[in-house]
Amino acid sequence: MLSTKAQAMSINTPTPPQRPILTRAAENGVRLGTVISVMVLSMGLATVFQPLVLLLWGGTIAMPFITYRMLRRSAVTAGGSLSFPEIWAEGIASFFLASLIPAAIAYICLRFVVPTFIADTVADSISALEAMGSQEFENIAETLSRASAAKMPTATDVAANLISFNIFAGTVLSFVVAVPVALTTRRLSAKKE
């Protein structure tokens, strides 16, 4: 016969109730948004100080690992009870909410801080292409010059494209990452039983 203490230890402790997906996604979104914002700012500042592009590359390489840790943490906290669609949906919602932060930063920077950034960058690109001395590069410079004369992207365009890109990339990345998260946390759930 087991003692009362042994019986209490043999009973599985209940899993805490799951927090809503939007709550988890909002917390994840703040973290992801910070990382993506640093990447966006480093991309813009790399036009002035080229070594900052390494920060962008590092963030790009790290993003699958960051996403894995983020989704795995939620799945483990839920006791391994999250299904693949729930994990994937959390990733999509996290990237959607995360995309709002760098979009706002890009909009503010391009609209108020450096409103000539896009025009200056395009002009510098045209000059660099023309300086190459090749007919191909001159053709590209001419095409770019015609396109920029017709219409330059606005701060709103850039912000909207950042949101779209981050949601699309986050959807694909979350799908890929949700597979190993679901498989590894399912094993965790099976071990508890």
Image: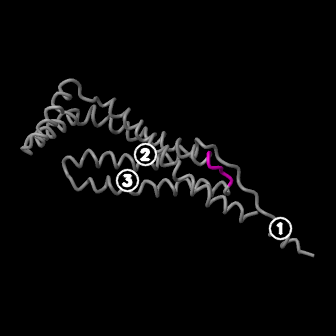
- Marks 3 & 1, CB-CB < 8 Å contact: no
Q: Earlier in the sequence, mark 3 or mark 1?
A: 1
Q: Residues within 10 Å of mark 3 (few under 14, many from 20)?
A: some
Q: Which mark is residue 111?
A: none
Q: Nearer the viewer, residue 95 or 38?
A: 95
What is the span of residues highlighted in magenta in the rendered image? 81-85
Question: 76 above or below 34?
Answer: below
Residue 172 vs 76, above or below: the answer is above
Query: Which residue is labeled 2 in the image?
Result: 33
The amino acid pointed to by label 1 is: Ala
Q: Secondary structure at mark 3?
A: helix
Asked which quadrant contains residue 101, the reply is top left
Residue 8 - label: 1
Total labels: the figure holds 3
- The residue carrying pointer 2 sits among few (fewer than 14), some (14 to 19) or many (20 or more) residues within 10 Å by Cα, namely many
Q: Position of residue 125 (x, y in %)?
A: 16, 40
Residue 88 locus on image (x, y percent)? 57, 46
Residue drawn at x 28%, y 47% is 43
- Residue labelled with disc 3: 60
